[in-house]
Structure formats: structure tokens, C-alpha cells
Image: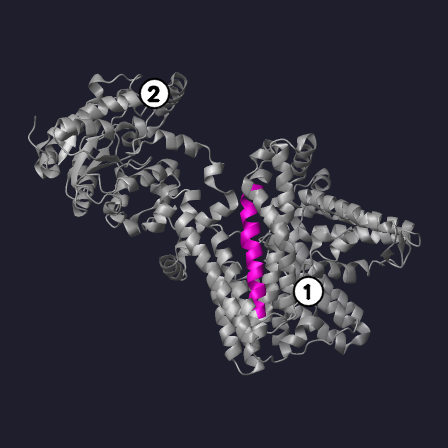
Amino acid sequence: MLFNTPLFFALLCCTLSLYWCARSMVSRQTILLIASIIFYGFWYPPHLILLFSLAIVAYGVTRLIEAERDQKSVWMAFGVLVSLSCLGYYKYAAYFLTLMQPIIEASGKSIDPAAYRMELPLGISFIAFQVIAYIVDVSKGKLNAERNVFVFLLFISFFPQLIAGPICRGNELLPQLKSKHSFDSRRVTSGMGILFVGLFLKVVFADNMAGYIDSVYAAPSAASGGELLWSSIGFGFQILSDFWGYSTMAVGMALMFGIKIPINFDLPYIASSIQSFWRRWHITLSSWLRDYLYISLGGNRRGGFITYRNLFLTMVLGGLWHGASTNFVIWGAIHGGYLAVERYVRGLITGTAVYQSGKLKYLGWMWLPVGWALTVFITFFAWIFFRAETLSDSMAVISGIGSNGFDGWKDVPRSLYTLIGLFILVMIPAHHFIEQARKEKMSMHWLLLTSCILLFLSLVMSSPDPVPFIYFQF
Amino acid sequence: MSRLSLLSALLLGIGFFTCVEIFARSSLFDMVSYTNSAKLDASINYSADLRDEINTFAIGSSEILYGLDPEVFDELAAINNCPEGVFNFGIEGFGPTHFEIILENVMFDDFFSQAKIALIGINMFEPHDTIPTNIQTGFECARMAGELQKSVYTSGFGRDNGLAELCPHSSNQTIFGSADVFLSRISYAYRHRQSLRSLILNGDARVQDPSREDVQKRIRPNGFYYSAGMNEESYAFHTNRWRTNFSQISYWQNELDLSLWQNYISENGIFDRIARQVEQQGYLPVFVANPSNPMMIEDTDRQSFYQINSQTMTEWAQSRGYAFLDAGILDSFDRQLDFEDHRHTSGEGAKKASETLASQFYKNPVVRTRLGCGELP
């Protein structure tokens, strides 16, 4: 049940109606939980068992952490291990077996990694991270363990953010799920406006770019340098519009229930440094990686080399989180490497006339456009590995662009250029609209008008068959 | 302020949707194809200019589009003391199987207010797929429509005439299908949203698609597609490809059952149904043997099949009070000079075929009565 399908909108409308008609908090929580079960179960009902099993384990573990404080590390480790094991089993077993295959076969045994490839439960990566964050936060005393098991199940399965985030922390979402919000028409309308902005981004830009880019990346050796170049640039915008669109829809939907969840994107392509990029791209993931991985590895507390190592490792594992593939590892390594280099350079210029007290000074301002160009270049270059199916495909794309990236640009459909140009134009106004709507600063009339126009444009521009969200595969 | 804000928002909203609607109705199909076929676009545009002047229109596939020259018909009309006014409404890829669907859904008096006769082109040596009697539920777009037909069915023309529903997308097959139907009825822009999308993404097709200009030059104002004449290189390419491929395709190798044609003309057979559709729309059905290149008939050894079918059609048409025309392509046509490729006539070949067909047409008593012709000279 994709977000951009009539069936999902039917579920949303029914849930909203019942939710706001319900008087008690318990009724509302029950309605949301049932809607979430229907939503997740629609994909593959048996995976509901996995979802709730993981949730029950987390619930039990956190209750034990609070009950047996002297054993909290053990219980925390157990809970994290269970979550990671689920993730590892479904997502990485076949990949690691492929890597180990030469060694295993050298010992005289044979193994078929393909036999271990599982049907990936939807959203398992996001669910696992949300569960881990909750367990660790309870263990560190940042929040109290939730006592109501149904509320906790709802926290884990809340359908707007279940499949592909934003990854919500316990202290962000749980209090809101337990408080009874009164119906506020402006808030609901704001949520609707944000929802339609997300839909607009997804169906107008991401879906319409997908067809051509997919066809080029399916056979990169057959494409010209220009086609490869513009498909790669296009993919950078496709993935942003796709994921930003999805996350925005999730934010809008949650707001329609009176619940505020964090945004995931803050104009990442205007970032003038890779550090800034990661504060603007998939914000909830990057903050999760920072809080639960980077800091756990030691963060920046143990000197230069260890800091660079931690940055690099965090991003490599972040890449691996996206998928069990060497390509994702390389993608993460590129970002990790650039983060480390950037940090090193920042260390060199800190305290000089270029950079003081965390701010650019004097000639440092000239660095901004250079920094922006470099960040964009590295990011779009790394996307090649993210998008290509295999390492050899990635190399084919790179060598194709490298040999003559200006050849064959006329073969690229005009629609791709149109979409890229239009997206660049609407990026900032869309972001501004989302910000204003979240703050509930817009009048209902303008919200309704914008929603109608965006819905109409989405209907006009939607491709005949729905295209799945890219991040659903993670 | 709140009321002013509400009024402004309302006015802007109404203004926006009104502008889009007006633009769609007045200019959209000047910039994008109405039918997804440059040739059919031209035919429809030209037919609008001749709406009240046409008494006879021809329907059929590309063999009719390339092969039936209304100008020749009009010359023969004058000679035979009959009113002039013939239009070629052939559509590439639309043989009897698909023209049956067109006739079910498209009222030709929208195009020709004074028409009396429909010339129906039929291929005389290939089998015709039959569509279940209830086209709406029985039509399998995926199986029965190729790319040529699908693109027309799902075009703006298809949407305006209920043809797009025959090739539905998944989005129309939910409970929201009824909302889609309702919105399509009340809003022209919504109904043609795919064309709007095409315009936004691809720009003005008049600029983007140079082949449209070429088509505009070749399509005559009477709908006839004039083939510029035999191009040796092109002819060789197409005929070599035909000769290489046909022997490997079972469709061409299968021996056809001679009773096939009897099924087509029997009650509820495809020709019977087409004839009744045409009569229901108020026209006299006149069947026409497509002027196909005899090369195909001879290579597949279907000469007898052709001859027997032609005789069958003649007798059947007479018994039903219709007419059947056959230009006798097996007899006096040059396989190279009179044809553009392995199938279609060249401009010269079309002239020759049209002379024979028109002569038969205007001498036929049933036709003469329907057209109100004067005394035969």
C-alpha cells in the first residue's frame, strides 16, 4: 500500500475520521494501532509477527532495565543484539556469506549464498534503529520505560513513519501518543498541506525521472557519456524528491493526527560542506548515527586519528545500513572519507584569519561557493555507487562519463532537463511552505488553496502506474 | 482581513482552475497530439473543415489510408453524375477488429454531418481476430492491442470517446475509479491530464517532433496519405525483411481454413456486426478489399483464399443490400512500381486502385440510390 495510491488515501481518510470522532485517548490509540496493523499487514501479513515480536522484546527489555538497574547493561546489550540480529539475519546473511564464500569453499565445503536471501520485511532497518534508540535511551535514563504495552506497540508501528522514517525517538513520539489533542482545524489543514507538498514532490519529480534513469542505469555500457552524466545528476534530484517527498508526507500525516514528528530534510543541496550536508540530509538517520554509533565509538574525544576513524567507520556502517552491497559500503566510505578530510582541513585553518570560533572569516567567505561546489560534486559522485546495481556498473558509469560526459546530451529526453530545472526552482519555496505550515503560521484559506492546486498538479503529472519509494527497499 | 483573505484565496483558486480549463479546451491539442498519431491528428483536423461536404467516408487500416485516394473518387463521381465528397479516415493499425471498437464508441456524425455511405476496408487474406460480443468486458487490451492501437485508445481522442477505459491502468480499477470517471466528465483538463503532463514534460510537440511537419505535408485535406512514390532503397529494405521473416512466423505459415470467411459473414460474425454497427449509425456499408501488395499474397500462397473470399463477399453484400468493391490487385498491379513496400500502395498505385474501386462504386445501383446520383451518362 504505497502512500501515493488511492487505497492508502482511503485508509488515511477513514482513520482520520474515526480518530477525531473518538472521545477517549484509548479509543484513539486503538484506532491508530489498528490502522498501523492494516497498513503494515497489507504488504505481507506474517511480518506483523516479526514487528510485534521485536516490539515486545524491546518493551520487556526496557522494563527489566528499570527493574534491575545493576543489570541494565546486560539487558541493554541483549535488546540491541536481538534487534541487530533480526536486521542481520534478514538483510545481511546472504551478503556476508557471499564475502565468505571463497574462504568456506577453500576449506572444502560448498555454500550457496542465494539460498539465504530472505524476503526483506518492509522497514526493518528503520524499525530496528528505532527500537535500538529506545532501548539505549531508557538504559541511559534519558526517558522512562513505557509501561503501557499497547502504547508502546503503537510507538513502534505508528504507520506514517513506520516504513521509511523519520526515525522517531521515544521522548519525541511517546508523550504525544499519550496526550489527548483537541481537534484544531488549522493544525489538521496544515498537516494536509504538508502531505500534498510531499505527494507533489514524489509524483511530479521522482516518479517522472525514474523511468529514464532506470533505463540508463539498467545498461550503462550501452549509454553515451552525456546520458550517463545527466542520469546521474538526475538521480541526485530523484532520490531527494522521492525521499523528501515521502518524509514530508509522513510529517503531514502525523500532524493531521495532531502529532509532530521531526523533518528529515533541510535543503541538503545548498550545504557548503559535507558536515552541513549531513545535518540537512536524512536528519534523523544522521543524528541516530551520531548519538548511537559515533559517540559510542568515542566520537571526537580521543584525538585526531581516532576521530577520523570514527567518522569513517560511522559512515561506512551507515552505508551498509542502506543495503547489503559493496556499492553501499563504498558510498558510505566516500562520505566518511570526505568528512574526515574536511575535519582535518578545518583543524588546520581554525584560529587563522580564515576560520575562527566556528565561523568563516575574511577570505574564508570565498570558500563558500568552492565548498558548495565540492560538496555537490562529492555527493553526486557518490550517488553513482548508491544507484548502480553492481560495482562493475558503477565503474561503467564513471568511465562512460569520464571518457566523454558531453557526448550524447541531446539524446537525453527534454523532460529530464525540464524536471531538474523545475525542481531547482520549487525546492526552496516548498521547503519554506513546509516550515511555515509546521509552525501553523499559514491561514487555512491559503493552505486549502495550495493543497487543492498541489493535489491537482499531482494528479496531472502522475505517471500511469505508481512507482515505489526508493527507501522502501531499505 | 480574514474575509478578504478568504475571498482572495477563493478568487485565486477559481482563477487558477478556470485558466487551466480554458487553456486545455482551447490550446492543449494544438501543442500535443490528440490521438497519439500524427496522421490521425491531421485527418481529424482536416475533416473538421469538410464536415458538411462529405457524403462518403472510408475506414480501415494503413492499406486504406495509403491506398484510397478520394480525389480520384471525386473525379469518377463527377463523370458518373454523382455528388462529390469522399474522405479517407483510415487509421494505421486499425483493421476490422479494432474498427469494430471504434464504431461502437465513436459517432461518425460528429465528424461528417451529411455522410451516407461508409467504405470499410478489409484485408482479404489474413484472419481477423474476433472480439467477444460485449466489448467492454471482453476486450483484452494486453492481448488484442499492439502499440499502435494502444496509443490511440489511451490518447485524448480515446478519452473523449470512451476508448481509454478499454485499456485501463491500475489507478482506475479501484473504488476511486468512479471518482475518476466523475471528474473526467466535468473537467476537460482532468480528463486530458496525461496530455497536459506530456506538454509540461516534453514541450510543444510542434517544435519537438519534426515528423509532424512531414506528415502534414503528406496528408491531403481529404485524409488520404500520399506516399511519395517508390523509393528503391526503402522498398528493398521492407521487402527483404518481409521475405526473411514471414517464413519463420507460424501466423503466415498456417494454412487458413476456407470456412473462416463464412464465419465472418454469418450472423454475429465480425463483418455482420460491423455492417450492423454502420447501419445503426445511419450509413450504407460498402466493403472494400484492401489494395494490398500481391507479393504478400503470393509469397504465402493464399491466392485461392483471396479469390474465394472475394467471391464470398460479393455474394454476401448483394444478399444484404450492401456493396463490395475489389480492385483486382492480383491481376494488373506491378508488385514494385505500384507499391511503397511489401504491403502498401505508392501514390501511383493508389491512383490506379482508386480508379478501379471508384468506377465500381459509382456504377453500383445501391450506391447510386443512396447517394441520389443522376442518370448514368
Three-letter amino acid code at the position of disc 1: Gln
Residue at 26%, 20% (x, y): give it. B298
Q: Quadrant of residue A212?
A: top right
Please report, as a chain letter, where disc 1 is located: A
A172 sits to left or right of B93: right
Chosen colour scheme:
one colour
Q: Is residue A4 left or right of residue A226?
A: left
Q: Quadrant of residue A180?
A: bottom right
Alpha-carbon neighbours of circle 1 within 10 Å: few (<14), some, or many (≥20)? many
Residue A249 place in picture, x, y as percent: 58, 62
Q: Please name the predominant secondary structure of the magenta segment in the image.
A: helix
- Residue that badge 2 annotates: B229
Horizontal and vertical percent position of residue B115: 19, 41
Are both tags, 1 and 2, on one chain?
no
Mark 2 chain: B
A189, B114: nearer the viewer: B114
Q: Nearer the viewer, residue A112 or A153?
A: A153
**Where are the magenta residues, as a range?**
A190-213
Residue at the extreme bottom: A23
Q: Amino acid at mark 2?
A: Gly
Q: Secondary structure at mark 2?
A: loop
Find residue A130 and name its label.
Answer: 1
Label 2 packing within 10 angstroms: few (<14), some (14-19), many (20+) = some
- Say which of A422 and A189 sits in front: A422
Element type where label 1 sits in the image: helix
